[in-house]
Image: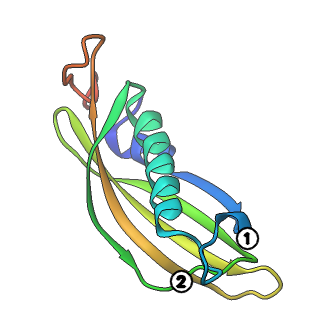
Amino acid sequence: MGTVEERIQKSETRIFKAVFPSTTNHYDTLFGGTALHLMDEVAFICATRFSRKKVVTISTGQIDFKKAIPAGTLIELVAKVDSVGRTSCKIHVDIFMEQMYTELRETVVSGTFSFVAVDEHKKPTPILDDLD
């Protein structure tokens, strides 16, 4: 499986999305709840790729919305393992916004999500079986 550091590197997860009007509010910007949903999804994928276990979201840390995300932009969500406990891991997620027709790219939302590994009885279990 490799070292913890190798697993962290291999589990980094990236998802790209186009922001369409169907995902925006009356200000023509991405719904905050939609951003949170996407962040939790990419964090879940990252935690699963890292541990190769069943994981569930147990909490979120502070989520910073630095700038509104307008319709007609592209976003990239990047999730990385930030820290590892005995049964849990913390995933940091950034949303980067890109203008479709320029090189402008900036970080617009950041936050952390915590996951715990669970066994077949939905009880916490070690996040990694083979800590090196």
Relative height, residue 120 to residue 28 (above, below) = above
Report the residue that reaches farthest toward the front: 26
Where is residue 39? Give x, y as percent.
47, 57
128 to the left or right of 99: left
Reading the image, the residue beneath label 1 is: 21
Inspect the image, locate mark 1, and give the three-letter code of the amino acid beneath it. Pro
Where is residue 4? Give x, y as percent.
32, 40
| Quadrant assignment, res 48 | top left
Q: Are marks 1 and 2 in contact (CB under 8 Å)?
A: no
Inspect the image, locate mark 2, and give the three-letter code of the amino acid beneath it. Ala
Reading the image, the residue beneath label 2 is: 68
Report the residue that reaches farthest toward the left: 86
Residue at image point 35% right, 46% down: 5
Residue at image point 74% right, 86% down: 103
Relative height, residue 35 to residue 81 (above, below) = below
Q: Nearer the viewer, residue 44 or 84?
A: 44
63 to the left or right of 78: left
Residue at image point 70% right, 69% down: 19
The quarter of the rendered structure image containing the C terminus is top left
**Mark 2 Cα shell of 10 Å, populated few (<14), some (14-19), many (≥20):** some
Q: Nearer the viewer, residue 19 or 79?
A: 19
Residue at image point 43% right, 84% down: 66
Q: Nearer the viewer, residue 63 or 53?
A: 63
- The colouring scheme, among rainbow, by chain, secondary structure or one colour, is rainbow
Secondary structure found at label 1: helix
